[in-house]
Image (spheres, rainbow, N blue to C red):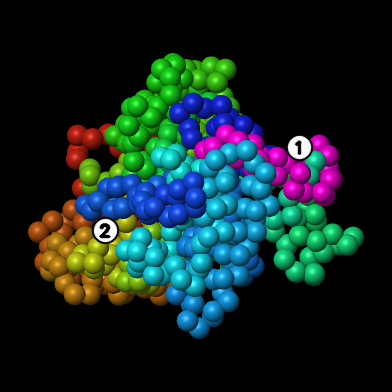
Amino acid sequence: MILQALKRYYDILVQDPDTVIPQFGYSTVGVSFALNISAEGDLLDILPQFNQEQRGKKIVEVPRPMVLPQQVKRSVNVAPNFLWDNSVYVLGLSEDDATKPTYSLARFQAFRHLHRQLLTGVESRAARAVLAFLERHDPAACRDHPTIARHLEVLMKGGNLVFLFENAFVHRDPVIRRAWETFKSVQSVDQMQCLVTGETVSIARLHPSLKRVRDAQPSGATLVGFNAAAYESYNRSQGLISPVGEVATFAYTTALNYLLSDANPNKKFYLGDTTVVYWAESKNRAYETAFASILEPEYVEEQPAQQQIGRKRAEAALKTAAERVKRTQTLDLDGLLTDLRDENPQFYVLGLAPNAARVSVRLFIADPFGDVVRNITAHYQDLKIVREFDGQPKYLTVEHILSETVSKKTRDKKAAPLMAGAVVRAILTNAPYPAALYYAIINRIRADMDDSEKRIHKINYVRAAVIKAFLIRKYRLQPHNPFKEVLAVALNEQSTIPAYLLGRLFAVLEKVQQEAIGSINASIKDRYFTSACASPRSVFPTLLRLSQHHIAKAEYGRASDRRIQDILNMLDVERNPIPARLTLDEQGVFVLGYYHQRAAFYTKATEPTPQPNPESI
């Protein structure tokens, strides 16, 4: 299904006049230099082909992208490209020449043999010039050539070379292009049914590599590939084990490489070690822009207006929705879906993770765009909770959530890879959040201690929101939700759930201590919170005794004393003793009670207390 979706997307990209994407048999490759040759095969000059790009505050030179004959796949094998390659193949130059005298020579000879095979007999002056150059060129003596000597240092650093003849690039010669396309059409002799298109066609034995997947090999990694006898069956090897036609193989890899490249206006984003790309099965590119802005509003740059396609009503609605999320305004989902009308294309989200020389699929979602947006909106609704400060983001992104599962003191800030993919899958499918997310948040609450200098907070806005959302989704499909009344946006003063009341009580006791003696090195939260959350009966008697000393010293001690008595009355400890142990779910409810009560202390009296939304629970 993934390959079929990418093949269909390639067909859309080919028809888009604003997208430069290669046709079958060609690849987009970065070129560093052009070899200017004469009709007799003499090297006249070496011309740099770099483009200047702004990278942060610096302007750097990057190879110029060109559409060239399709790149071959190689690791340690000798396999030249047609009409372009690095200096080892084109000129026979390498830093290993001194220790491996046959290394560069063998590759140059393979490059020359390929061009003899394809260009001999082609009626083109450019083709004859290239053949003449390859026949006259001597790798052993080329270092002494004055033109090569001037550029020897940069040539040794790598970079691709192309040929220039009479002020025109040889690879653009129409006669040579026809010769190359004829060669590609008859290259494969393996005819089988393609698993992507269902047609009987030539099968690709090797699939092109994917570039720019985070932490994968820089030279590229394979999505589909078999390189050992252990994977063979029915005497089939390499690509014949899972037959995909050459055209379909080219289409899906080209589309995926485009999504991963900087040429794609809708930038990929990262979740841990997972690289995430996304696309809509539509010519309207605004769907991708809206999705990125709604899911990750802080981490995707707004695209310039000239990159947007058309001025349809649907596009305007998508842009408005994305802007609302960026400005933390309420997202009008019903209005958005009404404006979309019949334009509700299939939308895809693909997460790729590195796996040695291959990439693995960590995440793949395929749903109508309206369903995707509806699920993201439900995610934001489930996370909604009273904020500690006005400046905190209204919409919590995936990055916000995952960052709270990792210690702020560790150097590696990446979340657990499998958990990152599971969280995004839960968001996009409106499924329960992974239990690993909840356990990670609880563990961080147990382990962390408040440190304002390092911006570490044991209980914070994001952690409380995640706990609330996890419990909402966990019990949503169950016949009974024992915590429904406290899974609200703000404080529920009528709830009698013991774990919630104990969390509220702890927040009151902490406030009394702060009012009595101010800021200290080790507060009751630092010393007792973890124990109070897990085994409250062993802790709260001690805390209540300490509170009497704090109440006597605090300026507003009587008000706090009344609040403590009110909570104890609701607990009814005489008939229902404080629990000896709290389950993991009850520990989350304890944290919510603490957070809600603490937030209520700083809520203005004129502000109405938000009530729970039964439909969201």
| Residue linked to disc 2 | 508
* Residue 605 visible in the snapshot: yes
Image coordinates of residue 594 in percent, x first then y, are 34, 56
Q: Which mark is residue 85?
A: none
The residue lying at 68 percent from left, 52 percent from top is 117
Counting from the top left corner in percent of width and height, residue 72 is at 62, 55
What amino acid is found at the position of numbered circle 1 in the picture? Thr
Magenta residues?
A: 172-200
Number of other residues with Cα within 10 Å of mark 1, as a class: few under 14, some 14 to 19, many 20 or more: some
Quadrant position of residue 489: top left
Is residue 418 found left or right of 64 in the rendered image? Answer: right
Above or below 309: residue 134: below
Real-space CA distance between mark 2 and mark 1, rounded to the nearest whole angstrom = 66 Å
Q: Earlier in the sequence, mark 2 or mark 1?
A: 1
Q: Residue at x 61, y 32 (%)?
A: 11
Q: Which residue corresponds to the image point at 61% horizontal and 65% vertical from the top-left?
A: 109
- Which of these two is toward me, 404 or 355? 355
The reply to whether callout 2 and callout 1 are in contact (CB within 8 Å) is no
Nearer the observer, 122 or 584: 122
Judge whether 335 appears above or below 500 on screen.
above
Q: Quadrant of the N terminus?
A: top right
